[in-house]
Image (cartoon, rainbow, N blue to C red):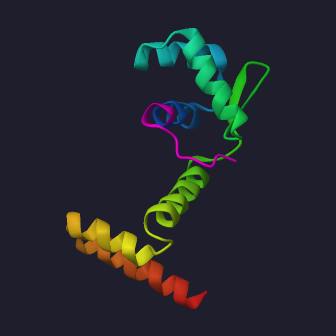
Amino acid sequence: MRNSMLSESEMAFARIIWDNEPIRSGELVRICNETFGWKKSTTYTVLKNLCNEGIFQNENAVVVSKMSKEQYLEQESTQIVNNRFDGSISKFVTAFAKRKKLSEKQIEELKKIIEDCEES
């Protein structure tokens, strides 16, 4: 699995696959040309790289995910917390909350997550 986060362009590309899978590689080329202005070779290079990372699979010209969007985001979130906040979720939330006021809904969601963790 990937040890680094997807770049912005890779993430936009990945979302196309996740939102349309299974998707034929020719259709993916067409969408990437319309969306990003990419040539066929660029699309196939990015696809090959992400397949090599274990995120997607391209068999018989049909692209599917080997890692769901949710699985990828969980992995990326863990990396961010570990690499930038010394593994501390509280440091991460504090840094986020200082820059953006949390809504009541977000606060309630965080409380629920904490309660669920306490019960586990």
Out of 97 and 70, give the one closest to the viewer.
Answer: 97
Q: Residue at x 71, y 41 (%)?
A: 54
x then y, percent, for residue 96: 30, 66
Q: Residue at x 40, y 78 (%)?
A: 90
Percent position (x, y) of residue 60? 79, 20
Left-right relation of 95 to 92: left
> For the C terminus, which image quadrant?
bottom right
Q: Is residue 1 left or right of residue 119?
A: right
User: Outermost residue toward the right?
Assistant: 60
Q: Which SS type dominates the magenta stretch?
A: loop
- Which residue is drawn at the image coordinates 57% and 90% (left, top)? 119
* Residue 99 vs residue 3, the one in the foreground: 3
Residue 43, above or below 106: above
Magenta residues, start to end: 1-10
- Horizontal side, residue 28 vs residue 12: left or right: right
Q: Which quadrant of the view contains residue 27?
A: top right
Q: Residue furthest bottom?
A: 119
